[in-house]
């Protein structure tokens, strides 16, 4: 008889499971997420025609390691080290693992939950209780119980499915956040490195001009001793040398701070990279043609745009979770085990028990809480949609501004280069006039000071042009690999 009862119960359970699975297949509430169309239809990326000098651009896909185009092995080494050692990047990896754990918790809700229980109670009823009056044993006794509890929620309306969908979208967004940070990190490493090389170039220029000023002071001193120069000329030459020398400590301090800035990006202590970076090197050359990818795919090139899209997906899935809360939930629950007043009887079949059946939860009155929760998720979804559109628009503006800045800096550099050659000629003629006695030394000092300022401006222009190129690569989403974005 007991065996027949168990078989009947198992058939009932199988039937209930089949009905639940059938309902689950067609009753997922809430909107289904679709990838948004381009928020802004811009068909081309091109240089601003306001400038004479333009950079050639191509639709070749931008390399994930775009910094290699500078052909600087030290920059390549720094980028590789930053990718593995940057502490903020390690923090993003920790956030990914947290999101992955939350996804695992959500997935677990789809599966049956089984737990073991065991219980022992020593009890004694009152001699004056109603149970004693009915003849119950009034001396102390032991009560033993052990077995398993099981439950499984049938996801009739897709509550669990939508929650899992949202958790997966959140994990994807976190993965993309890491890649977006990596893009910024690689750009910052290149930015700091190029600034360092620019500062070192300026230091070399000033030191070279210091040597020239010292030679000029010596020359003027000799001429003054021979009556060909005045004390005024001597004082001006001394002041010129001191003015050039005064720039050197400031530039050295700037150089040291930049080396430390690179060190912190690599998770290193102060001065840890001095041996690698202290020697000045030529400023990296720029490529003749800039790969910018296919303009219509810009939104897919930038991880921050894809992250905003993933968060919009999560917000959409949350609406389904909130809508499912309005509907009844059915959970299959069961318990089986053994119970007895004597521990030795627990192993006997007569001590066994079981119970099983559906448990139904139906919200009737919640004081408007469910309605407000749905309203909250719908508004959150609207906010996520606006954030996505804003991120796409910001991407287009960043690319346009970066291209504009690059063209501007190139035209600026060409003009400064012409000015530099002009000041070179002016200094040459001023020196010749002074040596021939037809000019005064003030003209030489003015021409020398102008040439120094021109050299520093030209060096700074080279650095700024390189930094403009870095900004362009960053705005195009360079520095990440889509293959690395996996939610498994």
Image (cartoon, rainbow, N blue to C red):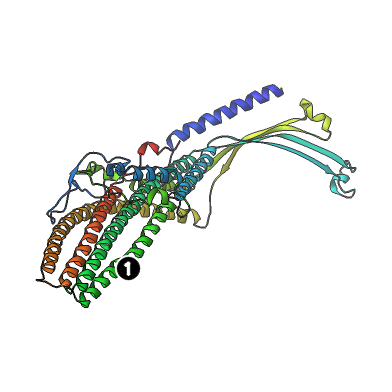
Q: Position of residue 295 (x, y in %)?
A: 22, 44
Q: Nearer the viewer, residue 253 or 111?
A: 253
Please count the marks in the image: 1
* Relative image position of residue 419 (x, y in whole percent): 14, 61
Residue 397 seen in this snapshot: no
Q: Nearer the viewer, residue 11 or 113?
A: 113
Q: Quadrant of the N terminus?
A: top right
340 versus 243 height, above or below: above
Q: Quadrant of the C terminus?
A: top left
Q: Say which residue appears at 54% left-offset and 46% top-offset.
A: 362
- Which residue is most to the left? 438
As drawn, the residue found furthest toward the front would be 226
Q: Quadrant of residue 448?
A: bottom left
Please name whichever residue, 394 or 400, is drawn nearer the observer in this view of the structure: 400
**Is residue 369 found left or right of 397 in the rendered image?**
right
Looking at the image, residue 141 sits to the left or right of residue 433; the answer is right
Q: Which quadrant of the structure image shows residue 73?
A: top left
In the picture, measured across the screen, residue 386 lies left or right of residue 51, that is right
Pick the residue in front: 87 or 104. Answer: 87
The secondary element bearing badge 1 is classed as helix
Classify mark 1: residues with Cα within 10 Å, few (<14), some (14-19) or many (20+): few
Seen in the picture, residue 240 relative to 258 is either above or below; the reply is below
Q: Is residue 318 visible?
A: yes
Q: Position of residue 154 (x, y in %)?
A: 53, 37
To which residue does mark 1 refer? 246
């Amino acid at each position: 008889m007991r065996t027949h009862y168990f078989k009947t119960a198992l058939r009932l359970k199988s039937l209930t499971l089949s009905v639940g699975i059938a309902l689950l297949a067609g009753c997922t509430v809430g909107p289904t997420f679709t990838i948004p169309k381009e928020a802004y239809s811009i068909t081309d990326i091109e240089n601003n025609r306001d400038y004479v000098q333009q950079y050639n651009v191509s639709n070749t896909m931008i390399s994930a390691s775009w910094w290699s185009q500078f052909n600087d092995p030290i920059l390549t080494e720094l980028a590789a080290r930053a990718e593995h050692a940057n502490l903020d990047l390690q923090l993003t990896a920790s956030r990914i693992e947290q999101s992955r754990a939350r996804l695992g918790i959500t997935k677990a809700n789809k599966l049956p939950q089984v737990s073991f229980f065991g219980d022992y109670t020593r009890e004694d009823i009152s001699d004056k209780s109603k149970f004693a009056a009915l003849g119950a044993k009034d001396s102390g006794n032991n009560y033993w119980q052990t077995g398993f509890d099981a439950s499984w929620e049938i996801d009739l309306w897709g509550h669990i499915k939508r929650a899992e969908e949202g958790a997966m979208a959140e994990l994807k967004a976190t993965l993309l956040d890491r890649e977006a940070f990596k893009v910024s990190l690689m750009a910052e490493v290149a930015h700091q490195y190029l600034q360092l090389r620019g500062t070192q170039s300026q230091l070399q220029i000033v030191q070279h001009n210091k040597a020239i000023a010292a030679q000029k002071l010596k020359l003027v001193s000799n001429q003054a001793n021979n009556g060909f120069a005045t004390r005024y000329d001597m004082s001006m030459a001394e002041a010129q040398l001191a003015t050039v020398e005064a720039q050197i400590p400031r530039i050295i301090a700037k150089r040291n701070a930049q080396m430390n800035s690179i060190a912190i990006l690599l998770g290193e202590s102060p001065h840890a990279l001095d041996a690698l970076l202290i020697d000045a090197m030529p400023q990296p050359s720029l490529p003749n043609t800039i790969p910018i990818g296919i303009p219509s795919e810009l939104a897919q090139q930038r991880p921050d745009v894809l992250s905003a899209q993933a968060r919009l997906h999560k917000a959409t899935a949350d609406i389904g979770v909130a809508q499912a809360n309005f509907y009844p939930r059915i959970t299959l629950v069961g318990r089986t085990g053994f119970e007895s007043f004597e521990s030795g009887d627990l192993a006997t079949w007569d001590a066994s028990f079981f119970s099983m059946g559906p448990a139904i939860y139906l919200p009737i009155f919640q004081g408007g809480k469910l309605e407000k929760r749905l309203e909250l998720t719908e508004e959150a979804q609207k906010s996520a949609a606006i954030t996505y559109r804003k991120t796409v628009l910001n991407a287009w503006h960043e690319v346009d501004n970066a291209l504009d800045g690059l063209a501007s800096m190139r035209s600026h550099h060409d003009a400064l280069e012409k000015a530099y050659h002009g000041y070179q000629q002016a200094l040459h003629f001023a020196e010749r006039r002074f040596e021939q006695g037809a000019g005064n030394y003030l003209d030489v000092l003015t021409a020398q000071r102008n040439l120094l300022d021109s050299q520093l401006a030209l060096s700074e222009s080279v650095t700024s042009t390189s930094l403009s190129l870095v900004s362009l690569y960053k705005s195009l989403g360079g520095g990440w690999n889509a293959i690395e974005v996996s939610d498994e």
